[in-house]
Image: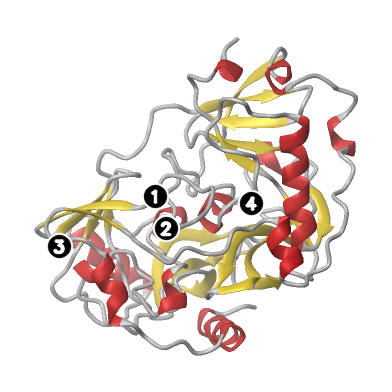
């Protein structure tokens, strides 16, 4: 069984010790108003970059899962099926925020601070800031602690949105809310209320020592609590639609469109090629986003903590391998040749993949409901 503290040590060993930098905190503008995270700009995840780095590039796979359709992207939606996406604890009803500085990723993290609360301008969640967050506590004690504040423990996907995996590279705060909280800089894991499907006696915890990673822990273990209130989060949308011809799925809640066809396993450069191949076959002439590998936060929005093997929402689970790892475009600890990965069987992100290793691929882009391709 993967335990949280062991996971942290393995990941720290893999990424290496990095020097802390107080300058990173100065990139956050203001403590009593709006501010946005300003992280380092990572290298673009392009095939050209992979070649320059000396990585082997494997030819992108054939699009065997897409059938005989040979029309354009707009034609993909001539035959569409409206669907109701199954509600589950980990599925967001809002656009998924990402740390600033990620090429191609949208919805940059942005916050508004007021006494005792930080409002997330992307998700609408209100995070409780405490003068004294207290010592690590059991799951039951953490639940009671949040209830006493008129709040609750966050779901897993909610807590992931305030992890800042980019900041680990420059020694900055890996907790997006850290400049406004009283948590110690060495904070490690925080409770979520999301259960771990293979063992209902456990709960998911999120790693704030590294700024990335979720793993499971026993409810009798002791970790810190970060409490949240629902605020004005999200949308009332509950559905989406699928393209029968092209095997695409649009999520009306997150405005993410996913490829239903899983490719691979492939090394990283070939995974990038695969998403580029979809762009070539189905050009998105008016969309602000291109088909690409998902970020760490985006792929975690697919996880259903009540499912296992695969631990994905039912609509996306069809045709998904029962095990293995999905690539993300998010590199680990500032290392551009190592990327965060999603464990398909249980939905954890406690491991990474070096670019030469093999992972499965599920491409994504953000769609706008007003674009011509969206119209019936």
- Label 4 vs label 1, nearer the camera: 1
Residue with the mark numbered 3: 31
Which element is circle 1 on? loop
The numbered mark, 2 or 3, whose residue comes first in the sequence reads 3
Residue where numbered disc 2 is placed:
99
| Quadrant (top left, top right, bottom left, bottom right) of the C terminus | top right
x then y, percent, for residue 306: 58, 52
Marks 1 & 2, CB-CB < 8 Å contact: yes
Mark 1 — residue? 108
Identify the mark nearer the N-term, 3 or 1.
3
- Above or below: residue 264 compared with residue 67: below
State the residue position of label 4.
307
- Which image quadrant for residue 25? bottom left
In the displayed structure image, the side of residue 142 where residue 204 appears, left or right: right
Q: Element under label 2?
A: loop
Real-space Cα distance between discs 3 and 1? Answer: 18 Å
Calculate the distance from the C-alpha at mark 1 to the C-alpha at mark 2.
Answer: 6 Å
Of the two numbered discs 1 and 2 on the same chain, state the one appearing first in sequence. 2
Which mark lies nearer to you, 2 or 4? 2
Q: Position of residue 267 (x, y in %)?
A: 79, 63
**Inter-mark Cα distance, 2 to 4:** 28 Å
- Of residues 318 and 45, the one nearer the viewer is 45
């Amino acid at each position: 069984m993967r335990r949280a503290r062991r996971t942290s040590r393995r990941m720290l060993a893999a990424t290496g010790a990095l020097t802390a930098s107080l300058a990173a905190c100065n990139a956050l503008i203001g403590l009593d108003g709006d501010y946005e995270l300003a992280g380092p700009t990572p290298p673009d995840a392009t095939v050209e970059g992979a070649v320059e780095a000396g990585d082997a590039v494997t030819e992108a796979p054939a699009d065997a899962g897409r059938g005989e359709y040979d029309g354009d992207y707009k034609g993909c939606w001539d035959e569409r099926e409206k669907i109701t996406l199954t509600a589950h604890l980990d599925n967001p009803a809002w656009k998924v925020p990402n740390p600033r500085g990620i090429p191609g990723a949208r919805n940059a993290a942005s916050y508004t601070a007021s006494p005792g609360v930080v409002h997330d301008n992307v998700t609408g969640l209100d995070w409780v800031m405490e003068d004294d967050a207290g010592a690590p506590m059991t799951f039951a004690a953490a639940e009671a602690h949040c209830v006493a504040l008129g709040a609750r423990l966050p779901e897993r996907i909610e807590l992931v949105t305030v992890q800042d995996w980019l900041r680990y590279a420059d020694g900055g705060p890996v907790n997006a809310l850290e400049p406004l909280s009283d948590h110690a800089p060495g904070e490690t894991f925080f409770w979520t209320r999301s259960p771990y499907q293979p063992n209902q006696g456990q709960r998911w915890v999120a790693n704030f020592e590294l700024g990335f990673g979720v793993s499971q822990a026993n409810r009798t273990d002791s970790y810190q609590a970060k409490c949240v209130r629902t605020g004005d989060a999200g949308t009332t949308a509950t559905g989406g639609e699928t393209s029968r011809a092209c095997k695409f799925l649009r999520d009306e809640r997150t405005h993410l469109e996913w490829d239903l066809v899983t490719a691979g396993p492939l090394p990283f450069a070939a995974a990038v090629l695969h998403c580029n191949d979809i762009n070539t076959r189905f050009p998105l002439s008016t969309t602000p986003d291109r088909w690409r590998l998902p970020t760490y936060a985006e792929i975690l929005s697919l996880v259903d903590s009540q499912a296992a093997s695969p631990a994905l929402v039912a609509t996306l689970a069809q045709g998904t391998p029962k095990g293995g790892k999905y690539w993300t475009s998010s590199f680990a600890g500032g290392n551009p040749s190592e990327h965060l990965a999603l464990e398909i069987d249980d939905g954890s992100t406690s491991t990474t993949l070096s670019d030469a290793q093999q992972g499965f691929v599920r491409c994504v882009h953000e769609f706008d409901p007003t674009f011509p391709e969206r119209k019936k």
